Image (tube, helix red, strand yellow):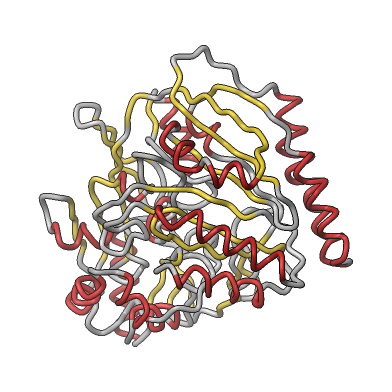
Amino acid sequence: MSTTASAKNGTWRNWGGTVTARPAREVTPASVEELTAAVRQAAEDGLTVKAVGSGHSFTSIAATDGVLIRPQLLTGIRNIDRDAMTVTVEAGTPLKRLNVALAREGLSLTNMGDIMEQTVSGATSTGTHGSGRESGSIAAQIRGLELVTADGSVLTCSEKENADVFAAARIGLGALGIVTAITFAVEPVFLLAAREEPMPFDEVTGRFDELWAENEHFEFYWFPHTTSTNTKRNNRSAGPEQPVKPLAGWFDDEFVANGLWQVANMLGRAVPSTVPTIAQISTRAWSSRTYTDIPYKVFTSTRRVRFVEMEYAIPRAALVETLRELKAMVDRSKFRISYPVEVRTAPADDITLSTASGRDSAYIAVHMFRGTPYQAYFTEAERIFTAHEGRPHWGKVNTRDAEYFAGVYPRFGEFTALRDRLDPDRRFQNDYLRRVLGS
């Protein structure tokens, strides 16, 4: 099964199946020059332009009825600077290819999300993140950007060059231009010791501050209709390397986490009354394990079962209260939720529209199996998240508008003013950006 979005008969669909679009034309540029020509041609033809990565956003952030830019030929590493400890990579490079290439060079990103199918530009432009006490999102590791702006010119930015653009464009939502290359900070490859084990919901919420403080990377999953969670602690290790054994890894990560999980969710979708029982069994299927490996083999996993997701960042201090409210809502509802709720954290950063901009954050992600009605559950969850000044992940389901975002992002006006300067004619506009940024 493909892990990327698809296009058939001129119709583009995202990975989660929540968005379709029919662009007037698709362009697959092989160089920055070809991309600038495509943007200029679109302007002459009066068409909007959007770049699309692997389609892993659940929102219509990349959808367009104008020109759809496919960046799959803009891939690979441009340059590794071992003195500055940076790597410059073409925007269409999948994170998977970047991680493998860096490991071959004895290098690694400091932190990353839990899947690596996305392109580097798609992941950073939407604020994709992992979990970290001191290390932030993938975008927080950016040291330089190159983008094609609405007039077809190429703009480079960093902390020293076009710093106002750099502050915003690291998570630019595709609103400021089309990213063509990204320079990331990297470090010598290191080992992470992973410890995965179940823990009761009341214990993990009662001890959350302690678990967060003791671990470089702490996250957990709570299974609705149960009082159980599965916790994951990742910390740097001097070694030795002790990877998951191939057979055990296949059984846990492929057979259970993908194969059986698909079957269980199909049963739950067909017969919702079975979901609480499936949830109880699922919590027992995730066994305790420890292993030590290089970062991308610890942080990331393969997700073949398709779902729909909403995720909100809230102030980290509000996490436990928010999560308890979410659990109480689920417990008293008639919802049947087969997917776990994922909880992660990130330190405050200085990116204008980062979900962690200016505040230490915790993330709560709710999911539903693809094809299962999700709107009612997500609506109730969103009501709880927004009561705590939640900021939705830009690539995940939300119903907020520009007025709301202006209230939860102190620098929102800074971003929209920059957009007015870089894209006054709204060459990169679409319905999603019209809603979240205003017109």
Whole-percent x and y of residue 328? 64, 64
- Against 256, residue 42 (above or below) is below
- In the displayed structure, 395 sits above or below 95; it is below
Camera-side residue of 134 and 111: 134
* Residue extending farthest left: 160
In front: 27, or 119?
119
Residue 350 vs residue 133, the one in the foreground: 133
At x 43%, y 24%, the residue is 236
Position in image of residue 124 (x %, y %)? 38, 54
- Give the quadrant of residue 333: bottom right
Task: Identify the residue at horizontal 46%, vertical 22% (top origin).
Answer: 191
Labels in figure, total: 0
Tell me the quarter of the image containing the C terminus.
bottom left
429 relative to 422 in the view: left or right: right
**Quadrant of the image occupied by residue 323:** bottom right
Where residue 184 sits: x, y (%)? 30, 42
The residue at 67%/54% (across/down) is 340
